[in-house]
Image (cartoon, rainbow, N blue to C red):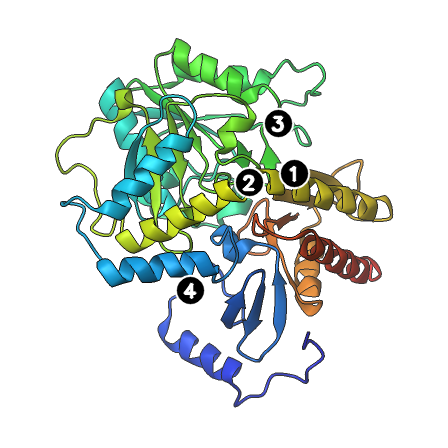
């Protein structure tokens, strides 16, 4: 690895890229001064030739790593046939991918509504739910993240430290939703203990559906493992209880698996961990094998829309569908759900060893290769270690490791380091990721 190079050359490739980017690109999702130019597998290079081990699947979009040869071949084959087909017409790749997603989905999920972005797919699910139920109000969790479009901002967390004024002036566009306390056994908002709480947080959904709406409930939307909300997994029994409550009020359970599906939490669909058969699952991020693609997969009961009420010109793009289908076929063939479970457990076990001597690690949470490490200044008070987490992110880069940060994610906030490596990651690469993380953590803790 080339991480002991001198300060950046003011006339070098990285600096030129930075200057041109600053001049022409509006940076709406953060601004890390790093230009990535080459990737292969779980390794990536910046414009100055520095190599990094990617423990976040390129922002959890490349679940099989950079430039997987079989995905590249699938894209080349599709490009050799036809590169774009309007959603108005039938398309082979689009249809084949929808069929495969339905074959692998739990229960009666069999109809696919394509979108482009995760937020767009959430909106699609909202349309489907409202048309069937006749209601307009959704139950969402307090620390949920479902997008930043006008329809989804109202469903995304509102804590002042999380949005840093990002909602200012948008009130007229924000739909009213029903917020209920979050599940978070490490930081229970109800002040309860998991051994005796009887999932009280889930029961608040029942109250909201009964008395919290204005124009009738339309559905319950939950993440099986909250990512942006702090890398928090739903406790055992939560999703099952939420589904029972939703069914009792005759509204759908909508599971947002934009980050949790496609072997990220272990199974192909994260809902499978709980054994539930929800009425809708929302997909995105890695769905297009690296290309923009999202979808809601639903039951026939919830598949009706009015003509032209929803749709995007690039929805179900054949290139993205071909890439995504190749990705899923590889996942099935190579039993990557099992690899995700096995390597994820290995990483959590290794992180637990680091925790024994750590001053900062307060909690480690993982399902498959969806792993969060929460940093706190004091294990008793659980005061979030925001500044230390920023230092850890920088130290990891110095050691050649790319990790993520969340809980909350905006500005300098965030005290949860996250690992989301490619789900086909090898044991050797996974162990190196944890080793580099341990070195970086020691560097930070040595300054405390």
Q: What residue is disc 4 on?
A: 27
Dot 3: few (<14), some (14–19), or many (≥20) neighbours within 10 Å?
A: few
**Mark 4 or 2, which is nearer the eye?**
2
Lower position in the chain sequence, tag 4 or tag 1: 4
- Left or right of residue 292, residue 85 in this image: left
Q: Could you give the CA–CA distance between mark 4 and mark 2, rounded to whole angstroms?
A: 38 Å
Q: Nearer the viewer, residue 209 or 307?
A: 307
- Left or right of residue 22, residue 438 in this image: right
**Mark 4 or 1, which is nearer the eye?**
1
- Left or right of residue 421, residue 153 in this image: left
Residue 115, numbered circle: none
Q: What residue is disc 3 on?
A: 189
Instruction: Residue 253 in the image: state x and y as whole percent.
Output: 41, 22
Lower position in the chain sequence, tag 1 or tag 2: 2
Instruction: Residue 260 in the image: state x and y as whole percent.
Output: 51, 39
**Mark 1 or 2, which is nearer the eye?**
2
Q: What residue is disc 2 on?
A: 335
**Label 2's element?**
loop
**Mark 2 or 3, which is nearer the eye?**
2
Q: Nearer the viewer, residue 16 or 143?
A: 16
Q: Is residue 448 visible?
A: yes
Dot 1: few (<14), some (14–19), or many (≥20) neighbours within 10 Å?
A: many
Q: Could you give the CA–CA distance between mark 2 and mark 3, rounded to whole angstroms?
A: 38 Å
């Amino acid at each position: 690895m080339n991480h002991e190079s001198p300060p950046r050359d003011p006339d070098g490739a990285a600096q030129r890229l930075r200057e041109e980017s600053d001049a022409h690109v509006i940076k709406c999702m953060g601004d890390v001064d790093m230009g990535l130019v080459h990737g292969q597998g779980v390794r990536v290079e910046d414009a100055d030739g520095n190599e990094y081990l990617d423990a976040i699947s390129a922002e959890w979009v490349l679940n099989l790593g950079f430039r997987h040869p079989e995905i590249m071949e699938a894209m080349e084959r599709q490009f050799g046939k036809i590169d774009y087909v309007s959603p108005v017409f039938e398309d082979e790749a689009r249809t084949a991918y929808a069929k495969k997603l339905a074959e692998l989905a739990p229960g009666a999920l069999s109809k696919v509504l394509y979108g482009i972005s995760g937020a767009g797919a959430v909106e699609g699910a909202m349309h489907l739910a409202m048309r069937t139920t006749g209601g307009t109000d959704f139950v969402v969790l307090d620390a949920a993240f479902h997008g930043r479009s006008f329809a989804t901002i109202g469903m995304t967390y509102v804590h002042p430290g999380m949005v840093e004024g990002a909602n200012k002036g948008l009130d007229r566009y924000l739909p009213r939703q029903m917020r209920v306390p979050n599940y978070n056994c490490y930081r229970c908002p109800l002040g309860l203990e998991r051994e005796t709480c009887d999932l009280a947080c889930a029961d608040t959904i029942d109250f909201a559906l009964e008395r919290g709406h204005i124009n009738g409930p339309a559905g319950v939307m939950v993440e099986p493992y909250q990512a942006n909300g702090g890398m928090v997994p739903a406790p055992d029994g939560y999703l099952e209880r939420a589904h029972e409550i939703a069914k009792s009020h005759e509204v759908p359970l909508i599971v947002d698996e934009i980050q949790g599906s496609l072997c990220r939490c272990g199974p192909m669909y994260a809902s499978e961990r709980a054994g539930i058969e929800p009425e809708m699952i929302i997909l995105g991020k890695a769905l297009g094998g690296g290309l923009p693609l999202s979808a809601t997969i639903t039951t026939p009961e919830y598949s009706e829309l009015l003509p032209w009420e929803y749709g995007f010109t690039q929805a179900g793009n054949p290139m993205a569908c071909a890439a995504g289908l190749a990705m899923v076929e590889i996942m099935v063939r190579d039993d990557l759900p099992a690899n995700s479970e096995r390597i994820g457990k290995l990483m959590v076990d290794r992180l637990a060893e680091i925790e024994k001597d750590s001053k900062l690690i307060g909690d480690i949470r993982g399902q498959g290769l969806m792993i969060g490490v929460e940093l706190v200044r004091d294990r008793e008070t659980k005061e979030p270690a925001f500044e230390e987490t920023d230092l850890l992110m920088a130290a990891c880069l110095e050691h050649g490791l790319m990790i993520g940060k969340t809980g909350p994610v905006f500005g300098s906030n965030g005290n949860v380091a996250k690992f989301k490596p490619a789900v086909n990651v090898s044991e050797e690469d996974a162990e190196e990721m944890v080793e580099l993380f341990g070195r970086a953590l020691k560097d930070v803790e040595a300054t405390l």
